[in-house]
Every structure is written in C-alpha cells, then in structure tokens.
Amino acid sequence: MKISKLQDKTIVITGASSGAGRAAALQFAPHRCNLVLAARNEVALNEIKDECESLGARVLVVPTDTSDARAMIGLANAADDWQGGIDVWINNAGILVAGDFDRTPMAVHEQVIKTNLLGYMNGAHAVLPLFKQRGAGIIINNISIGGFLPVPYGAGYTAAKFGLRGWSEALKGELTEWPEIYVCDLFPSFLDTPGIQHAGNYTGKALKPAPPVYDPARVGQEMVNIAQHPQSNKYVGSASVLLKLSHAVFPELTTKITAFVIRRYLKNAEPIALSDGNVFNTVPYSMAAHGGFGLPGAPKAHRKYIAAALFTGFLAGLYLFKK
C-alpha cells in the first residue's frame, strides 16, 4: 500500500507528546490527514493537538501507556473506529536510562524493556489484525542507531534496541505473504529532543547528547516520506550510517571507545541528583519537540562533512586505542 497523498489518511503516532513524535505530528499535519496522538501526558497531547489542527489536520487524542498491551489494543480500536480505518501506525514512544548496569534498579531496566521493546511489539500486535483484515497498512518503527551501536551505561536501552531490530526483521519475514503490509525501520542518530532531560539518571551527573545532534523535524519528515513511499530501512543522518559501519568493522574497539568517551564525559560533568525521570510516570516539563541542545531547523549539507570528519577522527582513535 503506497500512499501518494496523505490527505484524509489516518496516522497513529505513539510518544507524540514531545521529541520526535511531536515533531512528526507537526510534519504530517499540513497534509490534512487524520492524526491519532498517543502518549501518557494528556496535557501535552492536547497542546500538540491544537497546533496540528491549526495546520489543517483532524486530531484524536488517546492517552496511552504503550507498555500496557490492553491499552494499546484500546488505542488501535479507537483509531480504527474514528475515521474508517488506520493507514499508518508509527511506533515511536521510548524512554532513556543512564547508569552502571548493577547500580540501576532492575525494576528500571524492566520498565525500559517494557516501553522500548514490548511497547513496539504491543503496537504491532494490536494493529496487525486490522491491517490483515484490510490487506494493507504501514508500520513505522523509530528504532535509532542504538539498534546497531551498543551504549555502555545504557545496557537496558541497548538490550531493547537490539531486540527491536531483531523482532522487526523477523516480522518482515512473516509478512512476505502480505505484500501490501509494510514494516519500515528508522535509524536516526542522536536527536535534539527533550528525551535526555526526561531520562532516568543513575550516573549522578548531568547528561547531554553526543554530537552531531540532528533536528527531530528531520525524522518527522522521513516518517512522512516513508508513509508515502515505504522502504524497509532508512538511516537518518550520515552519522548513523558511519556509526553502524564503525561497529560492523571494529565491534569490540567501537564499544570500548564509546565507553571511554562516556566515562570521560561523566568524570567532568556537573553533579546532579539521581532520578527515575519519566521511566514510571510522565513528567510535567520539557515537552517540546526540540531539547535545546542544537540549532533547530532544516538540515544543512555541511553536517555531512562534519559527520565524516568526526568518523575519521573516531577511526583514528580506534587505531590509537588498539596500539
């Protein structure tokens, strides 16, 4: 099912209250589609609802915890009943946690898995029967380059993201008998979103994303493009491709260097209180699309050259570290 025009199509976006999900909603809205926005923070959802309606979209807000399988079935049914069926389902909701694996409570690791892995599985499990009934549909999974690149001090997050990539590949294999049902995976690099401000933090240090940091609107636009022209995998930002390649060629060294860089940063970062962040409950702050770590706006060509330079230096560091 290829959608040349998005007008009047129904798009479900989880994690729509902030970050990439909110950016995606704002990218879809001018196409005058039907947006179903889901997240735990109902206040933030209603704010983005007003913005999207002003841009021409019809909007249905459905407060939902993606880690709750029954709630996701409720979301799918509400969206399916609203405007005559779901066309695109975007799995996007996710949480971040940083800290030594053994110093981070297992309940936190478990919730990261429930949200970042089972949340996506819950979404697909809820919508696939509807897509199979219609014989068509598009699932977009916003996985991140974390599906290929391990993140030391984010072991639970890495477990979920690696699991997501494997689950999605298996699902694509199952659906080869359904040629009009697409599963499309997005692998963006680090984004300028509030996600890291919402993160569970057991490091005792203030967190910042690693450069280069990309505009989440770029991910939103890629979601729009994939909804119109589905493709199995899409890497957003040249840094994501380069990081994937680095780990493919030098897996052990890439992991060691990544850990070294994180430890060095944490050693010099400002102290901060330990926090669960938004792991178990939504938070009432920083619900914008952008996190304020970069310059919001359209991507510029020179960023590719910056990413290439960073990758060259990264490989040089790998070589020296090996020596």
Image: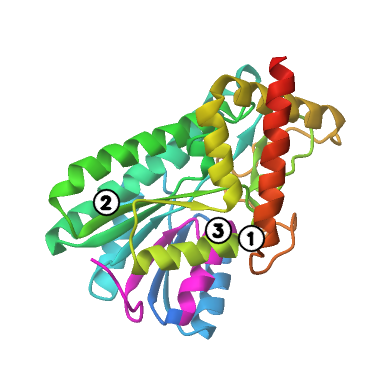
Label 3–label 2 contact, CB within 8 A: no
Q: Earlier in the sequence, mark 1 or mark 3?
A: 3
Residue 248 visible in the current orientation: yes
> In which image quadrant can residue 7 be found?
bottom left
Separation (CA) of disc 3 from disc 2: 22 Å
Give the x, y percent position of residue 247. Answer: 54, 30
Give the x, y percent position of residue 307. Answer: 67, 48
**Compared to 21, does 72 lie above or below?**
above
Tell me the kind of residue under disc 3.
Ala
Pick the front one: 100 or 145 = 145
Give the x, y percent position of residue 263. Answer: 76, 25
Mark linked to residue 126:
2
Q: Earlier in the sequence, mark 1 or mark 2?
A: 2
Label 1–label 3 contact, CB within 8 A: no
Few, some or many C-alpha atoms within 10 Å of disc 1 (few <14, some 14-19, many ≥20)?
many
Q: Residue at x 47, y 63 (%)?
A: 222
Q: Is residue 3 left or right of residue 295?
A: left
Mark linked to residue 20:
3
Q: Secondary structure at mark 1?
A: loop
Mark nearest the camera among 1 and 2 is 1
Q: Which residue bears the numbered disc 1?
A: 215
Pick the front one: 252 or 282 = 252
Magenta part of the chain: 1-30
Mark nearest the camera among 3 and 2 is 3
Tell me the kind of residue under disc 2.
Ala
Q: Is residue 228 magenta?
A: no
Few, some or many C-alpha atoms within 10 Å of disc 3 (few <14, some 14-19, many ≥20)?
many
Mark nearest the camera among 1 and 3 is 1
Q: Secondary structure at mark 3?
A: helix
Pick the front one: 143 or 121 = 143
Label 1–label 2 contact, CB within 8 A: no
